[in-house]
Image (cartoon, rainbow, N blue to C red):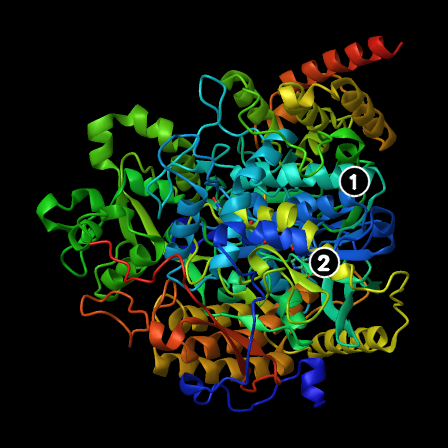
Amino acid sequence: MSSKEQGLHLVLEVWRQKGPEDAGRFESYVLDSVSPDNSFLEMLDQLNEKLVKEGQEPVAFDHDCREGICGACGCVVNGQAHGHEKGTTLCQLHMRSFPNGAKLVLEPFRATAFPVLRDLVVDRSAFDRIIQAGGFVSVSTGSAPDANLVPVAKDNAEKAMDAAACIGCGACVASCKNSSAMLFTSAKVSHLALLPQGQVERERRVAAMVAQMDAEGFGACTNTQECEAACPKEISIENIARMNREFFKAKLKRL
Amino acid sequence: MAESKKTGGATTAAPSGNAASQAPKGTLDGRCPKGPIADRWTQHKFELKLVNPANKRKYEVLVVGTGLAGAAAAASLAELGYNVTVLTMHDSPRRAHSIAAQGGINASKNYKNDGDSTFRLFYDTVKGGDYRARESNVHRLAEVSGNIIDQCVAQGVPFAREYGGYLDNRSFGGAQVSRTFYARGQTGQQLLLGAYSALSRNVGAGTIKMLTRRDVLDIVVVDGKARGVIARNLVNGKLERYGAHAVLLCTGGYGNVFFLSTNAKACNVTAAWRAHRRGAFFANPCFTQIHPTCIPVHGDIQSKLTLMSESLRNDGRVWVPKKAGETRPGADVPEDERDYFLERRYPSFGNLVPRDVASRAAKQVCDEGRGVGSTRLAVYLDFRDAIQRLGKNAIAERYGNLFQMYEKITGEDPYRVPMRIYPAVHYTMGGLWVDYNLMSNLPGLFVLGEANFSDHGANRLGASALMQGLADGYFVIPYTLGGFLATEPLGSKVSTDHAAFAQAEAETKERLQKMLSARGKRTVDSFHRELGILMWDHCGMARNDAGLRRAAGRIAELREEFWKNVNVPGSGTELNQSLEKAGRVADFLEFAQTMVHDALYRTESCGGHFREESQTPEGEAQRDDQNFSHVAAWEFTGIGEKPALHREELSFEYCKPSQRSYK
Ligand SMILES: Cc1cc2nc3c(=O)[nH]c(=O)nc-3n(C[C@H](O)[C@H](O)[C@H](O)COP(=O)(O)OP(=O)(O)OC[C@H]3O[C@@H](n4cnc5c(N)ncnc54)[C@H](O)[C@@H]3O)c2cc1C
Ligand code: FES
């Protein structure tokens, strides 16, 4: 059978959990005629249409933009956050990259700080609280000077942009054996530390964000670099090194 | 009130009747200031009443939505001292659809020294909108555009820079100056993260109460004023009441009425439609923008369409085979058998004609059977000549990430074979009617961003939606909201025990229960897809009287079937994504009829609204200024009932309407 014409045959093992209190379990589903042109989420849509027609409840999963930018989607596919393709969110992963007959095991992004709400949906609000602790420049509307008053070296602007490209999906946490949020937090710390606008609050920011990160129950970084490998935006772990430097500088100043 | 009107059940009432010649029930006043256009906003700000700083926290404000408009408004109002509560259906404010904007944001900074000015941006926007926008609003937008860039830079938005460290600009359609600021292909993301950081700062400081995973399902009106909302907690299904002195809807556009669009999946009309059902007028709903360069539809399971930035038309050449039914791969079709139809029809603008013109031309060649690819609903966007002329590296530098995205989705390498593109629904210019203060006709209900109808007329220029959302949020509402609240008695409390809250909650509950108990045979998506195809075929790129009438009839039938035959599994007391979708589709099914009605009513062609009956001998859009130089704002009169028309006359003192020509 040519999978191009007939579509793929897939065996899915999907984590099903009714709510935060439910223990949860894997359930198996067989799906046929999956077009190789479909995205991974469209494959899940197809599964859900089938489940609903059979009188079962569909698999809950978060998603929205379906073009790799909102950071809403994501689950672990065969042990890898967002699946096997490098630099790709789950919504951008296409079924043509799977062989016919593939067996796919789907689990939510697991971490103590990311409680499962249902099936593949987790609560990532801890990320928001890290930003609320200090991931900003304190400038109220109306008080900004002319935009070209402060030049920013192109190189720094580019580096800041590399870090700012983080979509807050949580793959870094899910792929880390310690459930560390260092890549996420350091991306924001770096983005602002690299720009002149971020200098005034530089030390306070890193101290507050790291404290919040710890309070949320994220683990420590032991440098296994899984986060960088899983990151759909290929955020570099250089940011973690930079955050560590920033953090120690801040600590020294405060002591 | 009829039962169906309360619960959203079906009625079979005749839909649009003789929309084409509908007499207005009333006229609307946009309450624009008078005087020279350049002084109006300044004068107006001065005349607006102020709320004493110490009293601001006594006023409660609800902001629905955390896109550019909502996040900017919430942060700015909290900084002023108002008591702000924000609701969003997303799991985090940073997920709002604004995040997906690619190309850039306009501002008349004139950093390029190429002749830009407030007046030029104003003029380009009014003309680009095909003379269907309010001059006063657009001028204000142009005036504050520069402040937006200042604010964003101060927040740390990493805009593109030149080697000297100063801000870079790029060109966009519909303008002859370079005024578009950008952050790679992720401008919306960076602007939203800037607004989100301002919002987050206030949440951290306790000056904003932020509630996520809350779906606003109704607007509560007490004694003629908007006083709150009913929201469903999406995690546990509980209905919650929120009261306030003012409600700001920043809930985005309704492009997903077409099912397939470039919008994020959850974009919806629900909050706006529910406000409409409670009395807010819906203005120009038929003004939708179809973007010419999107990746074509590939199959039945497809869930959304992906935009390929309009910047590609700078170097790509658009063509189809001359012969209908051509089967050779694009690269094998010899030069003399290719029709570069945009260059042929519009020699002076060529591949860079505005969005609406390019989209319609692509549709025409596909209608002639000359479309390409397996579905024949695509045209080529070919970089062969540009690669030959400039080299592969130069093209990769300019468009590398877009080429990569294209390859990811289609599995084809655009360096070797021409891209296939087709127009797709992208943006909605229509929305809730608002006056110059961004207040709807319902006192206390303000509407910001894509959800309102205000600034883009019948066609939006590229890079102007981000500008408008942030203008509304950072620089307009902080002034105009105060003007309204200052007239509200100090110390007045909004109680959610009021009968209006109980009633709205009961009606919402009943509607949800009705969807859950239908237990029919069709999934929510199957209804949405069918509605989408109907709208695309009859109320999409080209519209005509007969087709619109057919659509109106079929929408009514589909809506009736929905309530009887939809299958929504699960219960209302848990996280239930099928139920969330069902509610949105139910509202789209009601809204679609108003949209079709508006399209039937407006027998002229203008901007994105092309009525086949109204074209020039060359097949271009023909406006009818005599009869349609007005905003059509519709009042809800019942589901499937003919809405009542309220007209706001438009006058053009500074930009004289002319026929757009790109030949
Ligand atoms: C692919 C793409 C690219 C684009 N590129 C550009 C560009 O380069 N330049 C440009 O100027 N414009 C661009 N646009 C248009 C622009 O992005 C949007 O018009 C703009 O971002 C809309 O912002 P908004 O704040 O009005 O709404 P949105 O960003 O859509 O936010 C809506 C908010 O409302 C919330 N919401 C909606 N309904 C409910 C409800 N019932 N209950 C609770 N919350 C609700 C959502 O959660 C969200 O927070 C692009 C659009 C698309 C689709
Ligand atoms: S759905 Fe937005 S990143 Fe995947």
Q: Residue at x 69, y 29 (%)?
A: A184
Q: Disc 2 designates what residue?
A: B483
* Label 2 secondary element: helix
Report x, y in % for residue A212: 83, 29
The answer for how far apart the CA atoms under marks 2 and 1 are is 23 Å
Report x, y in % for residue B239: 82, 66
Q: Amino acid at mark 1?
A: Asn
In the depicted structure, whether residue B3 falls above or below residue B120: below
- State which quarter of the image contains the N terminus of chain B: bottom right
Q: Amino acid at mark 2?
A: Gly
- Looking at the rendered structure, whether the residues under marks 2 and 1 are on a common chain is answered as yes
**Can you see residue B363?**
yes
* Label 1 secondary element: helix
**In the rendered view, does B84 fall on the left or right side of B580?**
right
Question: In terms of depth relative to the viewer, which is nearer, A145 or B613?
Answer: A145
Question: In terms of depth relative to the viewer, which is nearer, B41 or B466?
Answer: B41
In the depicted structure, whether residue A150 falls above or below residue B51: above
Q: Residue at x 75, y 71 (%)?
A: B225
| Ligand number 2: quarter of image | top right
10 Å neighbourhood of mark 2: few (<14), some, or many (≥20)?
Answer: some
Chain letter belonging to callout 2:
B
- State which quarter of the image contains the C terminus of chain B: bottom left
Report x, y in % for residue A92: 52, 42
- Say which of marks 2 and 1 sits in front: 2
Question: In terms of depth relative to the viewer, which is nearer, B351 or B63?
Answer: B63
10 Å neighbourhood of mark 1: few (<14), some, or many (≥20)?
Answer: many
Q: Disc 1 designates what residue?
A: B202
Chain letter belonging to callout 1:
B
